[in-house]
Image (cartoon, helix red, strand yellow):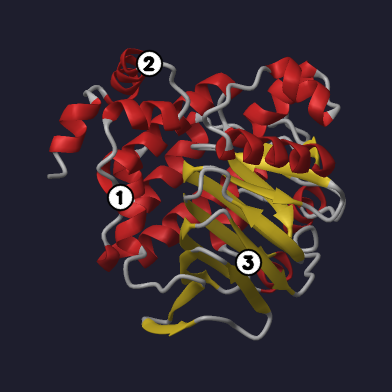
Amino acid sequence: MEQKQLLRIKKNLQDVPKGTLKVEHHFNGHTETNLFTESFQTRTEGKGKMAAYQVFPGIQLSLNYSLSEQVSFQHESHAHILEINHCQTGRIGWDFNNGTSVYLGTGDLSLHSMECCADSVMMFPLGYCESISVSINLEELKRNPLPILQEVSISIEQLDRNFCRPDKSIALPSSPAIEGIFRPLYTVPAEIRLPYFKLKVQELLLYLGYLNPNPAGLTQYCSRQTALIKDIHTLLTEHLDHRFTIDELSKKYLINTSSLKEVFKGVYGLPIATYMKEYRIRKSMELLRQTDDSIAEIAAKVGYESQGKFTKAFKDITKTTPTAFRKSFH
């Protein structure tokens, strides 16, 4: 449970009204804030913020914060703009135009062309996410090549062929190389962000120049499968007082048990039993803060047959007891 990171996301979004994705443009040393641009439209029931920086001609980096289950995006279909996304906190996923879905967890990286996601939904299975996106216009990069790429003979045409295919996206698991590029970007002081972003974007381009175009990446799933898993998730979380077995779910949703377990973990990041234990405890924490229900009543509401079993599970996750947790809020 990423409580510290979640608090940081909430702090960054405290001035953003619900139902809004705020876009802040930091271009040429000036800050302009608006909700939409001409070629970029969004819709969300939650809220989010994108702080976008023009790093080089044709290259933009944005720090993204979201408290939402999903955001719908509509933008122009650009075959030669490479979209790179890094997930720092929470989980993030897409259903692409080619019928596949990809989900990222902490430290994971995805690459695809803007043609793949011109009219798509970005999903946040845990209800929150902190991420970085880098957009690289490869046609613009050809016209304004960076000296560092010329020094090592990295071909922009090769980057285009490798990573901007309309029928393909790449998702890479966290690695020391990826972490070394992206992790510092989340905490760099505001006054040196732009020069630091310039440094790291060049490092990213060098990394991509030597990246195998067909890496052994994260598993991608059929969008129909992930939609089914979301329906199962809704059933589980709306009926916490019932303990569904894997076999029950498999028969009810006509999916074999191995696929059910694999795709659920791919979308939500944890095995079903582990995820539901954490979900029940998160829900109980809300009830402890917001209601005067007894510990026994809360235990029953989140699916525990006894207060003792609930207390043990609560302590496993939070390292404190339900009683002590409630007292800390009064």
- Mark 1 sits on what residue? 7
Observer-nearest of 216 and 289: 289
Tag 2: Cα neighbours inside 10 Å, few (<14), some, or many (≥20)?
A: few
Of labels 2 and 1, earlier in sequence is 1
Tag 1: Cα neighbours inside 10 Å, few (<14), some, or many (≥20)?
A: few
User: Hey, what amino acid is under mark 3?
Assistant: Pro
Answer with left or right where residue 223 lies relative to residue 30. right
User: Hey, what amino acid is under mark 1?
Assistant: Leu
- Mark 2 sits on what residue? 306
Instruction: Give the alpha-carbon distance from disc 2 to disc 1, as whole Å.
Output: 31 Å
Disc assigned to residue 208: none
Q: Nearer the viewer, mark 3 or mark 2?
A: 2
Q: Nearer the viewer, mark 1 or mark 3?
A: 1
Answer with left or right where residue 135 lies relative to residue 62. right
Which x, y percent locates residue 86? 54, 47
Answer with left or right where residue 242 lies relative to residue 161. left
Which x, y percent locates residue 212? 72, 35
Observer-nearest of 193 and 105: 105
Answer with left or right where residue 228 lies relative to residue 23. right
Observer-nearest of 238 and 292: 292
Observer-nearest of 26 and 44: 44
Q: Secondary structure at mark 2?
A: loop
Tag 3: Cα neighbours inside 10 Å, few (<14), some, or many (≥20)?
A: some
Of labels 1 and 3, earlier in sequence is 1
Which x, y percent locates residue 213? 76, 39
User: Hey, what amino acid is under mark 2?
Assistant: Ser
Q: Secondary structure at mark 3?
A: loop
Instruction: Give the alpha-carbon distance from disc 3 to disc 2, as whole Å.
Output: 66 Å
From this view, report whether residue 318 is shown above or below residue 44.
Answer: above
- Mark 3 sits on what residue? 145
Q: Residue at x 37, y 37 (%)?
A: 2
